[in-house]
Amino acid sequence: MAVTQVAYQAEGWGVGELWLEDGRVVWHELPWPRAGAPARAGGALGFAAELVGRLQAYFAGEAVTLADVPVDLEYETPFLERCARALREVPRGDVVTYGELAALAGAPGAARAAGSFCARNRLGLFVPCHRVVAVGGLGSYGSFGVAYKRRLLELEGASLR
């Protein structure tokens, strides 16, 4: 089956993109202001249209869960797969440290490896790495930056450490 790419507008956030295959998300690019990017899902049907609606509701501040959305969790190593599965279980509004994520994935002491997993996450929101924080603060959030991470956590009502 072919991969379908869908762009969507999230009011106040920008344009995000989804890549879907066989009824599951294989990649998600978080919304960001993008020059010349499409402003809506443009003809998305079925699963894609429903998913775009859920994402738009999420970014509008509604208490939408994405934990039930089918995603591609096939990673290079079993540890990375366990990180993804464990992180999908962290509820909206909660945060864990990189060390706690590593322990949840069955590898206590592998905080740096958990951080590397988060840095390479291709399923933002569906595998919510923004819910992983450093012991002494928010930690980083790649090219989106700490302000974007803080905004996502505030949207979810997280109690920031």
Image (spheres, helix red, strand yellow):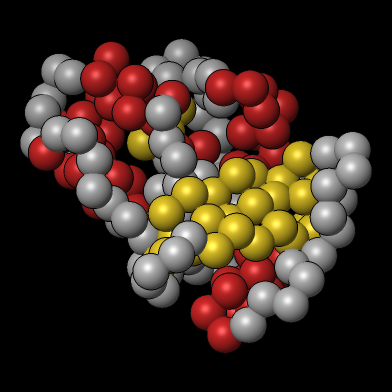
Left or right: where 104 falls relative to 118: left
Q: Is residue 77 visible?
A: yes
Q: Is residue 58 visible?
A: no
Q: Position of residue 25 (x, y in %)?
A: 44, 60
Q: Residue at x 60, y 44 (%)?
A: 29
Q: Position of residue 86 (x, y in %)?
A: 25, 48
User: Where is 79 relative to 119, above or below?
Assistant: below
Between 20 and 105, the one nearer to me in the picture = 20
* Extreme residue in the right direction: 36
Left or right: where 159 falls relative to 145: left
User: Where is 41 relative to 27, above or below?
Assistant: below
> In the figure, residue 88 lies in which quadrant?
bottom left
Left or right: where 21 falls relative to 101: right
> In the figure, residue 32 lies in which quadrant?
top right
Q: Position of residue 87 (x, y in %)?
A: 32, 46
Q: Residue at x 39, y 18 (%)?
A: 135
* Extreme residue in the bottom direction: 46
Between 44 and 108, the one nearer to me in the picture = 44
> In the figure, residue 45 lies in which quadrant?
bottom right
* Extreme residue in the front direction: 2
Q: Position of residue 140 (x, y in %)?
A: 54, 19
User: Where is 63 relative to 104, above or below?
Assistant: below
Q: Residue at x 83, y 39 (%)?
A: 34
Q: Residue at x 51, y 19 (%)?
A: 139
Between 88 and 2, the one nearer to me in the picture = 2
